[in-house]
């Protein structure tokens, strides 16, 4: 009995020793500070305690760090698409940690849109470059008759006309005109496709081949000696455009669009401020604009993805979907600014008209100029 009791005591003491030896703290691999082993995240630096590096973790961390792609995105996406204006209203009211920041939402969705749009841009760029290249070349080609008739064929036609009595009623002058028609058909007609920009292209080509100084090349395309800085930059880009035969101009326009949108979006917010002067500060209207433009990018991204990867939707359906975003704007204004449907519809109509008829054309002109100057 005594021995059994002694053995039991020994066993209990070993269990207590094992429990005492179990570590209760661990060291964070990032900040090297100690914290409780049961913590999932380090209380000092916030890194996950058991952060095993895998391909999935690496991909998630990259997206999360650069685009804040986390649970807040999914929590924000549903109300953004299906409840117009609600997300902006909640963010302005103070619920800002629950949802993705409007600028981050706009940035992430715009990156997806321009990525999908780049597939189409490559097609447009290739087609436009081919058309410009043909326009820059002076080509002689048969455009009327690629298979001219020989004299034997013409004689057979004349004999057929005579047998059927088609020539009997014609005067000498009419017969001569008919012969001239046969002669024209028997010879191929050459047409020159010469694409000019108001300067002598052949002279500029010769100067470029001879590696002439830039001053002579600029003078050959019509630049005056007293031209200003902007005008000189324009003519230099024109020479570059000529050397490349227009190649890459569509890509340059595409690269300038994202920059222009950062200007167009605040202008849209300013228009909203005018129509809703007493409905919050400019920052409130900017939040609304960020979310609304994010929805526009979501809609266009879905249209592009379906057309490119699933099925080619008819153009009229594509335009109908894009135009339906106007009614999203109406309902979003009604929710965010707390006004009636009719007033929201009128203000949405006027603000959209001003934006599309005045702001967008000016912005597109600026985009074209900047794209050409930085081409």
Image (cartoon, grey):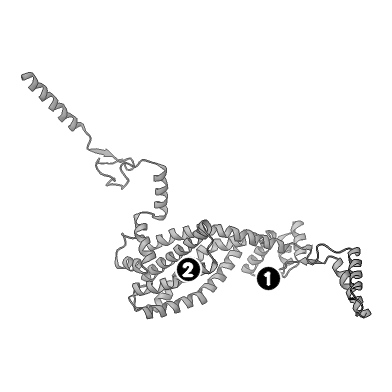
Residue at the (44%, 60%) spot, across then down: 109
The crowd level at tag 1 (other Cα within 10 Å; few <14, some 14-19, many 20+) is few
CA–CA distance between discs 1 and 2?
Answer: 52 Å
Name of the residue lying farthest toward the front: 164
Above-or-below relation of 6 to 31 = above
Residue 357 picture location, percent across and down: 52, 77
Query: Can the viewer see residue 93?
Result: yes
Name of the residue lying farthest toward the left: 1
Q: Earlier in the sequence, mark 1 or mark 2?
A: 1
Which residue is tagged 2?
321
Q: Which mark is residue 226?
A: 1
Residue 205 picture location, percent across and down: 75, 60
Residues at discs 1 and 2 in contact (Cβ within 8 Å)? no
Identify which residue, 184 or 163, lies in the foreground: 163
Give the position of the C terminus as an image quadrant.
Answer: bottom right
> Is 261 on the left-hand or right-hand side of 90?
right
Q: Residue 244 is drawn in which quadrant? A: bottom right
Query: Can the viewer see residue 239?
Result: no
Total marks shown come to 2
Q: Which mark is residue 116?
A: none
Numbered disc 1: secondary structure = loop
Residue 203 picture location, percent across and down: 77, 64
> Is 88 on the left-hand or right-hand side of 245?
left
Please state which of the two labelled residues, at mark 1 or mark 2, is closer to the viewer: 2
């Amino acid at each position: 009995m005594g021995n059994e009791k002694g053995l039991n005591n020994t066993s209990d003491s070993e269990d207590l020793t094992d429990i005492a030896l179990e570590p209760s703290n661990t060291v964070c691999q990032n900040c090297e500070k100690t914290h409780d082993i049961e913590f999932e995240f380090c209380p000092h630096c916030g890194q996950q305690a058991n952060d095993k590096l895998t391909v999935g973790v690496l991909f998630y961390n990259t997206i999360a760090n650069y685009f804040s792609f986390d649970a807040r995105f999914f929590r924000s996406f549903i109300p953004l698409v299906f409840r117009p204006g609600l997300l902006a209203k909640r963010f302005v009211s103070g619920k800002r940690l629950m949802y993705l920041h409007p600028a981050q939402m706009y940035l992430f969705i715009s990156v997806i849109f321009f990525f999908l749009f780049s597939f189409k841009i490559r097609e447009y760029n290739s087609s436009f470059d081919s058309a410009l290249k043909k326009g820059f070349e002076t080509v002689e080609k048969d455009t009327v008759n690629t298979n001219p008739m020989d004299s034997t064929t013409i004689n057979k036609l004349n004999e057929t006309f005579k047998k059927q009595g088609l020539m009997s009623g014609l005067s000498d002058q009419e017969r001569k005109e008919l012969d001239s028609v046969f002669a024209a058909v028997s010879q191929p007609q050459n047409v020159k496709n010469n694409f000019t920009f108001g300067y002598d292209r052949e002279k500029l080509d010769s100067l470029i081949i001879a590696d002439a100084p830039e001053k002579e090349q600029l003078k050959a395309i019509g630049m005056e000696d007293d031209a200003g800085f902007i005008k000189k930059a324009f003519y230099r880009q024109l020479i570059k455009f000529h050397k490349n035969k227009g190649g890459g101009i569509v890509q340059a326009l595409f690269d300038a669009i994202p920059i222009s949108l950062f200007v167009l979006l605040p202008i849209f917010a300013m228009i909203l401020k005018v129509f809703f002067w007493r409905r919050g500060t400019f920052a409130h209207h900017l939040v609304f604009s960020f979310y609304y433009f994010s929805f526009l990018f979501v809609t266009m991204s879905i249209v592009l993805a379906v057309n490119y990867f699933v099925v080619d939707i008819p153009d009229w359906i594509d335009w109908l979907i894009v135009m339906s975003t106007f009614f999203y704007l109406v309902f979003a204004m009604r929710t965010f600014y707390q006004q009636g449907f009719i007033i929201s519809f009128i203000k949405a109509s006027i603000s959209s008209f001003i934006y599309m008829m005045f702001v967008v054309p000016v912005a597109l002109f600026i985009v074209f100029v900047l794209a050409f100057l930085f081409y």
